[in-house]
Image (cartoon, rainbow, N blue to C red):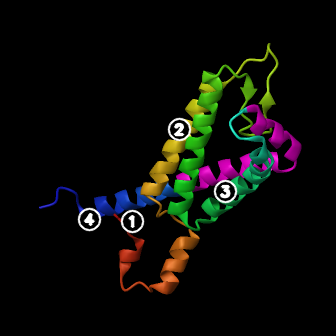
Amino acid sequence: MSLVTAPSQQRNRLLLRLFSTVLRVGLGAVWLVAGLLKVDDPDGMVRSVRAFRILPESLVHPVAYAVPFVEIALGVLLIVGLTVRLGAFVSAALFAVYIAAISSAAARGLRIDCGCFSTGGDLTAEAPTQYTEEIVRDSALLLASLLLARWPDGFLTVDRLLDRTSHPPLDDEDDQVRED
């Protein structure tokens, strides 16, 4: 005998879908804004990527030019809800890479602006670093990405629309959150 009633289960499913939608649109907006703020300054992005002193010089330009477009594409995919689970995993991977890069810069004593929501680069000796804040922020966004990867079935997604057209519902089960 289940202790949770059917209306309670339905309410929980709806809340989970709402939570998923908020995560998806929120993360999508973060990626979209981050990419749009960088896309019109490729030279600044080169300075930002170079400042981390991680990549060989032959990769600095290609990575610097690609990052804003990857962020914009990821933001759009998440906002419209296309390949949500894959987008959430890509988002988590990017945040993990960004956390590792910022941590590496801090550990090596570099004084840089990460360029997360702008183009960054080397800081002056007087300018404070914000490594702790950046790592905490990116860690929270990494967690949000992982939660979205676990529960990708929100409202208003292209994924759900495509799923409905390829598998017409036989009953109300299409409104339930998948538990895979």
Q: Nearer the viewer, mark 4 or mark 1?
A: 1
The dot on residue 63 is none
Q: How far across and how far down the image is residue 79, in percent? A: 63, 60
- Residue at 82% x, 42% y: name it: 46
The answer, for residue 41, to whether it is visible in the render is no
Q: What kind of residue is marked 2?
A: Ala
User: What segment is highlighted magenta in the picture?
Assistant: 22-51
Disc nearer the start of the sequence (4/1):
4
The dot on residue 140 is 2
Mark 4 lies on residue: 6
Q: What kind of residue is marked 4?
A: Ala
Q: Secondary structure at mark 1?
A: loop
The answer, for residue 70, to whether it is visible in the render is yes
Foreground pick, 177 / 91? 91
Mark 3 lies on residue: 75
Q: What kind of residue is marked 3?
A: Gly
Foreground pick, 83 / 158? 83
- Residue at 30% x, 61% y: name it: 9
Disc nearer the start of the sequence (1/2):
2
Mark 1 lies on residue: 177
- Residue at 52% x, 49% y: name it: 145
Q: How far across and how far down the image is residue 109, in percent? A: 67, 19
Q: Secondary structure at mark 4?
A: helix
Instruction: Give the spatial CA distance, label 2 vs label 3.
Output: 17 Å
Instruction: Give the spatial CA distance, label 4 vs label 1.
Output: 14 Å
